[in-house]
Image (spheres, rainbow, N blue to C red):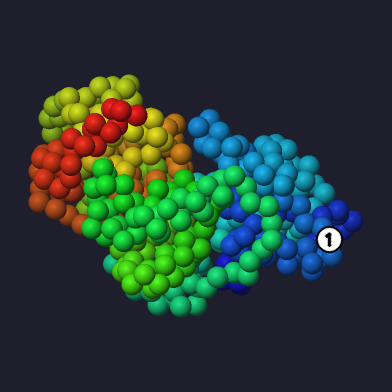
Amino acid sequence: MEERVRKLNADPVRGGARHVLYWMRWNRRLDANHAYTFATGTAKRLRLPLVVFESEDVGSERQQEFVRAGSAGSGHAFGSRAELAKWVADAAAVVTDDWPEALDPLPEFDCEAYAVDASCVVPASVIPQRAYAARSIRPKIHRELPRFLKPLPKVKAPVSKGRAEGLRVLRRFLEERLHRYAAQKNEPSAHATSELSAYLHFGYVSSLEVALAVREYAAEHKLIADEFLEELIVRRELAFNFARSARRVDSLDELPAWARATLDKHRTDPRDPVYTPRQFEEAATYDSLWNATQRELVRRGRIHGYYRMYWGKKILEWSATPEDALATMIDLHDRYAIDARDPNTYTNILWCFGLHDRPWPERAVYGTVRSMSRAGMERKTDVAAYVREVEAL
């Protein structure tokens, strides 16, 4: 547990206080939650009751609606960060979820305070150096997994609506999709992915319990789950590694030098067409596939992962500058995606500009940043089936 715990200040326990506070910012569950486990231990140490306070002001109105609905039945205090102050004022000590501060800075506390990493399987403190590609972080994660890929003791606690739904989606993935995930994960019309991103983002389920459930189910049914575990653990924790080490997660300055240089070299390349942010938002391009990805984002609050890459690459190709493209992608995600403002969000967006990638053959606008084409999507996926499905939503 020590490697998951970060002490936030040198302040002592507040004398005469009424409780210990667990501020549930991002991991909205009590079971399978290292932060809650540490908070209960702190309350026992100080011989005080534990209060759990859950934030409701989490981003866009769409995200707030998701959280309000999902937290029904949780049985603990729920409100805005303004209301948090009164609970902090009466707290002997505060425990909260550790989350990259470039995404969600913590306030200063005037009593003993801790942040606990309950989002990653391998705690971020174990691999503090910035990784520049999956291949550089993968062996480090695999080396540490035997120590951390272990279940926490079960907790008897109310199950919120969001957690119950997240566990249902996990069970559906295990029983209906895991056996075909490796072969069909990049085919949107096959519906072979887990669709757990929103539940992981808000912490209704943990990556640790998902990994353990997948590993156990795969062993029992003689399945190979390596590709899914690569996405869940290595790729997701690469994103957390980036978000924790970046000065600004929404800046092209965080790109590798080769990507910045090639985008600058091709900054004045002719772009035809060039769309405005409003045209992108309204899915008003000439490309029916791209329009379908944007409509899926608006209607479902997500885009299938493989097509989301295409969505981002085309915004880069059809924007006046790389900076305009980045601003458009972040704005659309922030307003429409249920899992917006996540380490994966910013990492996947910046991947469209070369983050965690390598140089490719040079071409207009992209330079040596990887490009994606409609023809490639047609060869590799059933574009027509996807477009029909989105139109029918």
| Image-quadrant location for residue 265 | top left
* SS class, disc 1: loop
Residue 296 position, x and y percent, is: 33, 33
Front-most of residues 92 and 65: 65
Is residue 178 or residue 129 the one in the foreground? 178
Label count reads 1
* Left or right of 145 on screen, residue 160: right
Q: Give the residue at x 46% y 65%.
A: 213
The outermost residue toward the right is 16
Quarter containing the C terminus = top left
Quarter location, residue 39: bottom right
Residue at the image point whose x is 89% and y is 56% from the top = 16
At 38% from the left edge and 52% from the top edge, which residue is drawn?
194
Kind of residue at disc 1: Leu
Give percent across and percent down for residue 343: 43, 50
Q: Quadrant of the N terminus?
A: bottom right
Q: Is residue 149 left or right of residue 139?
A: right
What residue does disc 1 label?
48
Query: Local crowd at mark 1 within 10 Å, few (<14), some, or many (≥20)?
Result: some
* Left or right of 392, for residue 163: right
Residue 202, percent from left and from top: 53, 48
**Residue 288 visible here:** yes
Picture coordinates of residue 356, whole percent (x, y):
29, 56
Residue 235 at least partly seen = no
Q: Residue at x 87, y 58 (%)?
A: 15
